[in-house]
Image: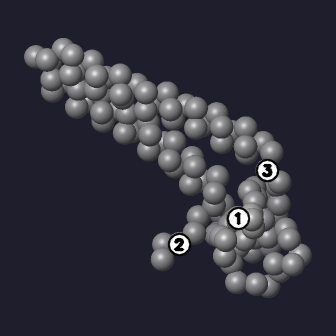
Amino acid sequence: MKPYKNKINRIRTFALSLVFIGIVIMYVGIYFKNQPLVMVIFMLLGVLAVVGSTGVYAWIGLLSMKTVPVECPNCGKQTKMLGRVDMCMHCNEPLTMDPSLEGKEFNEEYNKKNS
């Protein structure tokens, strides 16, 4: 199982990867200089990926402003929590603000709403 990372950092990483994917798609479009329609399609797809990245960055910025800043008990640095359980951005210490989850094994399933 892959190690759990902080939610905000995962979304920011996804947005950054969208920028690079968009640039690579546009770069591939350069190889189709002789077929302008194909080149334009690749360029537009690349621009859409970069614009999508901008939207994701704006969304996570707004979401980040609503999070609760807490001090990590392990490293003492301020971090932002999103959900009932999350990891410290700096040292990957499991964090929770729910007293009923204190001392329990970290599980991402605690963030999902029970239906």
Q: Secondary structure at mark 3?
A: loop
Q: Earlier in the sequence, mark 1 or mark 2?
A: 2
Q: Above or below — where is 12 with respect to 97?
A: above
Please, which residue is most extreme toward the left here?
Answer: 34
Query: Quadrant location of the C terminus?
Result: bottom right
Q: Distance of mark 1 from mark 2, alpha carbons?
A: 18 Å
Mark seen at residue 3: 2
Q: Which mark is residue 67?
A: 3
Residue drawn 72% across and 71% down?
Answer: 110
**Helix, strand or loop at disc 2?**
loop
Q: Amino acid at mark 2?
A: Pro
Q: Is residue 2 visible?
A: yes
Q: Amino acid at mark 3?
A: Thr
Q: How is the image coloured?
A: one colour
The Cα atoms of the two marked residues, 3 and 1, are separated by: 17 Å
Residue at figure coordinates x 74%, y 56% from the top left: 82
Q: Sequence order check: which comes first, mark 3 or mark 2?
A: 2
- Residue 76 seen: no
Query: Extreme right residue here?
Result: 99
Q: Give residue 81's mark.
A: none
- In percent of width and height, residue 104 lies at 76, 84
Spatial CA distance of label 3 from label 2 is 22 Å
Residue 6 at x, y = what percent? 63, 61
Quickly name the residue at label 1: 112
* Marks 1 and 2 in Cβ contact (< 8 Å): no
Q: Are marks 3 and 2 in contact (CB under 8 Å)?
A: no
Residue 99 shown left or right of residue 109 in the figure? right
Residue 73 x, y percent position in the rendering:
80, 73
